[in-house]
Every structure is written in C-alpha cells, then in structure tokens.
Amino acid sequence: MPTQQETLQQVAQAKTYKDAGNDFFKNKQYRKALGRYHFVLLHVNGIHDPDEGNQGPKGPKATTFGEEDSGMGIAKMMAEQSQSKEEKLEKTSLEEIRLLKITTRVNMMTCLLLLYEEICEQQAQPMEVDDHPMEMTGDLPSPGGNNQSSNAMDVDDDAAGASAVATTGSAGSSSSTTNNQTPTTNPDLQKQEEEKSRLLSRCIEEGKKAVNLVEKFPNLPYPSGAQYAGKPYFKLGQGFLKEKNVEKAVEMFEMAGSKGGIDCRKEMNECKVLRKRIEKEDSKRMQMMFGGKLR
C-alpha cells in the first residue's frame, strides 16, 4: 500500500493532468481533453479508498488498563496523536480523490456530448456531390476497448465545466432532427451513427459511475458549492435524452433538480416533446402494420 506521501504525489499529478485537460477543453480540443482526463482517473483509481470498497471504518483499538501511567502509555499516546494527524490528512486526501473522480467524469461527459453534437452538425450540413465524402475527424474507441478512452470522460467544477452545461443544453433536439434529414445514401452515415452510439454509451457509462459516487459520498466539499452535486445527473440526463430514453432522462433531470437545484425545465420540456413524437411515430407504424385499419 502506498504511503501517505506517495498518495499525495499521485493526487498532485492527477490534478496536473486535469488542468491540462481543462486547457484543451477551453480550446475545443475535446478528444485531447479526454486523453488527459483518462490519465487523471488512471492515477486516482489506483489509490485505495476503503469506504468506496464498502469496507467499514476502522474501529478504536483496545487499550490496556494502567498503560497511561507507564512510559509505554506515554509513548502510545504520542503515537496515537501522530496517527490522528495522519488520519486527518488521509481524510483530506480521500475527499480530494473522490472529488477528482466525480468532476473529471463530469468533464468527460461534457466532452462526449460535444463530440456527439459535432457529428450531428456535420450530418446536418448539405452534402456536396463529389468524389470526396465527408470524413470523420477522429475515432473514439468503443467502451471496454482501448483503455486510453475507457476512463477519459468528465468535466470539472471550473469555468470550463460551467460553460459546457449551457453549450450542451439542447440535448435531444439536434440529434432527432438530423436523423430525419441525413440522406441514407451517405456512405459515411453508418460510420457516423456508430461513432455517435459509442460516444453516448461512454457518456452514460461515466455518468453512472459519477452518480454512484455522489450517492455514496453525499457531503463532499465541492469547490463550486453544493449545486455541483446535481451536475452528474444533469449530464447523464442529457445522454439519455440523446439516446431517446425519455423515462431515464426525466428521472435524471428530476434528480439534478433535487440534488443540486439545477433548473431543468427546458430539458423536461424537450423530454415531453420527444415522448409525443415517439408516440406519434409508434402510432403511424402500427397503422401501417394493420393496413391503416387501426382506430
């Protein structure tokens, strides 16, 4: 098990990677940002967290009657005082580690959602009739594949993370529109749709991990305030909305409101519109199946 000093060094290195990721994010280099966030999680995931592993807190050690009156008792008292300082330092570093795990994943989710939007914007652009079809700018490995991306997705409580909430606010509108507008003859359409699916799967996977940590550690001292606790739910709701999983999206937006006081009325309205559209499409499909005889 690493010493406390080694743990602090790992945390410091993780913060350095996170700062680098935030710089890439601000410059709209989202894939490079994801790579740096991945290294953050590589560092902090390797640090043992007894509470995260469902192990109970350490209980008080048994004492021997009369020890306090002996030289051994004084030595033990000094050792316990030293241990108390060590445990206080350990508690502080554990809180930092948990915050890093949550905020980094939120940053990663934001990057994933923005990359998803970039593809939607590409699909919405009119196709030129030539021999050079639109190409993908990069390829993010699928979940469980290259571990360069397996942990690399979440955005933090700084200005970059705050601005990203507004940037990715219209979660369901662009994807649902482009799905209807994109020509089926586009040779890159399948590749783009597969990429979008990978991005959403990764976003939802990281979101679930972040939400689990928020649930497990409800009283973390978020630098930007208690409202930040609602961000993982908000981002996860956006991912579900883009995936057209309306019920899950509604659940997450409600949690974002209750956990962090985030105003999700716009997103909830998008869920309502999407639900009606899905119901209408299902009704048309049923009418076609029954030869238009459905009443």
Image (tube, rainbow, N blue to C red):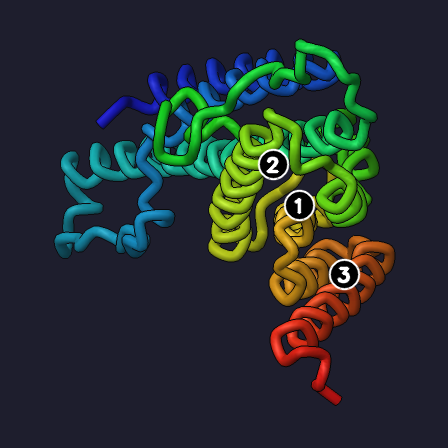
Three-letter amino acid code at the position of disc 2: Met
Give the secondary structure at mark 2: helix
* Quarter placement of the C terminus: bottom right
> Compared with residue 18, is residue 162 higher up or lower down, i.e. above or below?
below
Q: Gap in Å between the C-alphas at discs 2 and 1?
A: 7 Å
Q: Position of residue 216 (x, y in %)?
A: 47, 55
Q: Where is residue 194 in the image (x, y as percent from the top left)?
A: 53, 35
Q: Nearer the viewer, residue 44 or 280?
A: 280
**C-beta proximity under 8 Å, tags 2 and 3:** no
Judge whether residue 154 can be spotted in this image: no
Q: Nearer the viewer, residue 142 or 59?
A: 142
- Which residue is label 3 attached to? 274
Give the secondary structure at mark 3: helix
Circle nearer the N terminus (2, 3)? 2
- Among all residues in the image, which is located at the extreme bottom? 295
Judge whether residue 172 can be spotted in this image: yes
- Identify the residue shown where x is 54% and y is 29%: 191
Three-letter amino acid code at the position of disc 3: Leu
Residue count near mark 3 (Cα–Cα under 10 Å), binned few <14, some 14–19, many ≥20: many
> Compared with residue 9, is residue 198 higher up or lower down, i.e. above or below?
below
Front position among marks 3 and 1: 3
- Identify the residue shown where x is 73% and y is 37%: 182
**C-beta proximity under 8 Å, tags 2 and 1:** yes
Circle nearer the N terminus (3, 1)? 1
Residue count near mark 1 (Cα–Cα under 10 Å), binned few <14, some 14–19, many ≥20: many
Give the secondary structure at mark 1: helix
Q: Gap in Å between the C-alphas at discs 3 and 1?
A: 18 Å
Circle nearer the N terminus (2, 1)? 2
- Which residue is label 1 attached to? 235
Q: Where is residue 53 in the image (x, y as percent from the top left)?
A: 31, 48
Three-letter amino acid code at the position of disc 1: Lys
- Which residue is label 2 attached to? 109
